[in-house]
Image: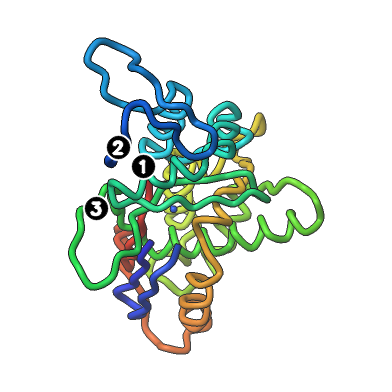
Amino acid sequence: MTAHDEQTGVSRETDLPHDADIPASADLADGVVATDGLWPGDTGTLPAQVRSALVQLIRGPYVSARRTPNHWATLLAHESVIRSRLADVWLDLALDEDREVAFARNAPVEGESVPQMMRKQSLSFVDTALLLYLRHQLLRASAAGERAYVGLDELTEHIQQYRVDGNHDHAIAAKRVKAAVDRFVKYALLDRTDTEGRYEIMSILGLVVTADLVAGIEAEYRAIREGVRGGSVGSADGADGVVGEEWV
């Protein structure tokens, strides 16, 4: 996942969507026995449940014990062969057994141009600032052995700390926050609760927003919030500082 803020100049690389010469009769890694074919003409070697877990990882947004328990169990049982098949199409597996989440990402290949399976999406300054805040709340709740929740009003108040054009206006800031939250729900980083305007922060966010990414941009955003650099960031229409982010 690559993060680059055109306003602050921050750029960081970090760990936010097939078969290779294996005989049909061979036994595969992790105790997977090659299949004879699931339909006429099928030359694949993986059992149905392993194929399904592989597809879910590629299709995204992620596999977890909570959202997709069957795929999660299959992934843990057959991690090696799934990693191998992902690598065949230039993908890497990010897996955290403590958080019980995993997702596929573009392989961190250096020195040559390779196909990119996972699309990249631009994130605004507001998107990225919220992700940092949500990660902090998630880690704090996790340390206490609790699930993490957040409200729209709380997020709007947080964003208004930053001296970004338009954010001093509560209505504009609330509109930007709601748009960002809707995107996070789409990517399953947040989950709606029964209470209007309140969301659960999903554990995958801690894996997507890594410590390396946070270290790279937190100081810059603090400087913006405190007005150290002077002036403002972005524009009133919400296209305020683009951060490139790899999503599944």
**What residue would you read off at disc 2?**
19
The crowding category of the residue bearing disc 1, from other C-alpha atoms within 10 Å (few below 14, some 14 to 19, many at least 20), is some
- 85 versus 212 height, above or below: above
Quadrant containing the N terminus is bottom left
Q: Nearer the viewer, mark 3 or mark 2?
A: 2
Q: How far across and how far down the image is residue 214, in percent?
A: 52, 71
Question: Circle 2 — which element?
Answer: loop
- For the residue pair 19 and 145, the one nearer the viewer reads as 19
**What residue would you read off at disc 3?**
116
- 176 versus 39 height, above or below: below
Q: Say which amino acid is labelled 1.
A: Arg
Which quadrant holds residue 197? top right
Q: Residue at x 27, y 40 (%)?
A: 21
Res 18 seen here: no
Quadrant containing the C terminus is top left
**What residue would you read off at disc 1?**
85
